Image (spheres, helix red, strand yellow):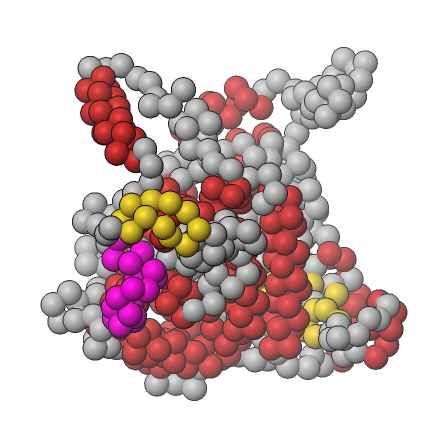
Amino acid sequence: MERAAELHLAPRQVSVGVSGGISILYHGLRLLLEVHPDFLVVRIDLRNAYNESRRAQVLQRMAAVPGVASLVPLMHAMYGPAGIIVLPDGSRLFAGSDRGDFEEGLPQGSPESSLAFCVLIQEAVQELHEALAGGGGGATFIMDDGYCYGRPEEVLPAIRRFADRLTDLGLHLQFRKCSYYSPRTLQGAVLRDLDALGISRGGVMRTPEGAEATQREICIIQPFLPGITVGGVPLGHEAFIRQYMSTLTAGFVSYIRSTIHQLQPASSFAMWSCLYSAIQTRLDFWLQHLTPEETEATCHTVDAELRDAVEALTYHGATASEEVRLRVRLPIWRRGCGIRSRLSLAPAAFCSSFRTACERLLDTRMADGVTRPGFFPQLAHRLGARSFDFDTPDLRMSTLLASDSDLGHAFSDAWALLREEVDGVVDVTRSPGLLSHPAETVPAQHRMQHAITAQREAAAARRLDVLMLALPRTDPRRHAWLEAGDHAQIAGRWLASHPSERLGLVCSCSEFSEMLVSYLGVDSPAASSPGVLGASFSGYSGGRQRFVVDAGGWEVERVQMPGDGWRDAHDYIASTVFDLVSLAGITGTMEP
């Protein structure tokens, strides 16, 4: 079904059946505006697109498409009866009515709806594209969000005709919710036409830094920053991108601080689980599409917030040393904590997204003789007409990188940094990976960012190992690093787990903190607390019987305490019996 959808909808639709569709559209548009800065891009908005689709026409269009027509009987059965809409309070939308609540439209969220809607408007979208393709422009859609681009004098008439075609389908283009962007200043006639249609200029007002101002004051004293968003990613003037990312970053800071405030007092383990599994990746989508330079300020802020979050779960200054900070950023299976630096991640994220997208921009000749249509074939001169054919591996990015493309230079610079990281640390001749290739000929591959990250993290782990082994032999950070280096790589597995009472994965906030600092080899909050640090206690070790609590609690851990001999024997017997019972198929726990 996915392949059938791609064959019918691509390259006009990037949302159904196309992997990485938004990346293809964003990078393609950005490259196109480099070549044609006089082009106009209009972001199209449809009113209640799914809800206003006529079901009879949807089924008719679906039935005519090989590969997806088999869905029509199911959809007919689903859409035949009038639907019922139940409100949050349990009442009907039209209470007391004999009729259904909705008899037309596609149910949003239903698996087949996006495919059905895209098939419905495909013919109109294709006509819109063909009206602009002659001048080097075109049209590409993300389901009901459309982007048409080309010469200004051609774009506006094409949009008018497209709006008329949509009316025949029961759909309505909302001109007043459309927005436009052009790198160059538009001429008076074009501006008048845009204003007559009600299409507004995309962008934001620059907000003052370090000062408060009302919206009215901002509009008066601050310049307008032109741009639009493509799939949620800012496209426009460099100041527009900075302003957009600044707003996005502020939202992230508020989100992570609110999460810490609400979760950490209740469960540090739950807080860590959210931080590791969800929070840290919230801005990664933008790192994939914007250049490292454009996301640098955001990454610095995010990294600082992630560091503060880790220290909120331990204590302020826990990650102060370079060795601990680098270890926290390593993946868990490499003896780290898996809280990756976004500043470090950005070059790999951008390079992977950009390189993979470039593979789909041009018409490409495949090994089986089939030509796969590209999403932006008008970029053939910029990228090189045959650069991505199956038999031209020596071309690939060469033409682009030899041009004056700013995006090409950003890719080349970021790729050089990635290669420099592993140079001399990881032997790419014995284990060749993507970073063994120069930027000009690096191939695209599935999960490209993952492959690059694996090479980089191998190099980072080796560099950190050198730093750790250079520490004094008595340094707890060195001990903790070596103790975590077991062949089974299980020392930090608990960091990737989630709290579960059913599985016995529960601990108090103070217990979690002690577990984490012990894993990292830094001071213990409990041992460093007033009244405990420096306290004398009894035990047995090397003939000594009196000891003093140190900041890390290491003395307490090493010393044989009264009763430890009995406890060690008890725990060993309990573990052995529990393993035998488990092998017999009987489940249970070692603790009541």
User: For this rendering, which residue is in front, 287 or 178?
Assistant: 287
Residue 230 is a magenta residue: no
Question: 376 and 477: which one is in front?
Answer: 477
Left or right of 151 on screen, residue 358? left
- The quadrant in which residue 5 appears is top left
Q: Kindly give the residue lying farthest to the left in the view shown.
A: 430
Which residue is located at x 29 percent, y 78 percent? 420
From which residue to which does the magenta span run? Answer: 465-484
Answer yes or no: is residue 375 visible: no
Q: Position of residue 530 (x, y in %)?
A: 56, 54
Give x and y (percent) for residue 144: 59, 48
Relative side of 149 to 362, left or right: right
Q: Residue at x 56, y 35 (%)?
A: 109
Seen in the picture, residue 522 relative to 379 is either above or below; the reply is above
Residue at (24, 77) in percent of width and height: 423
Query: For the N terminus, which image quadrant?
Result: top left
Q: Position of residue 419 (x, y in %)?
A: 29, 75
Query: Residue at point 19% right, 20% down?
Result: 580
Is residue 469 highlighted in magenta? yes
Q: Main secondary structure of the magenta part?
A: helix
Q: Nearer the viewer, residue 21 or 579?
A: 579
* Image coords of residue 277 (percent x, y): 46, 46
The answer to whether residue 340 shows anywhere in this view is: yes
Report whether 108 appears left or right of 496. Answer: right
Displayed quadrant of residue 357: bottom left
Placement of 508 over or under 221, stated as above or below: above
Q: Quadrant of the C terminus?
A: top left
Instruction: Count the marks.
Output: 0
Q: Is residue 536 above or below residue 210?
A: above
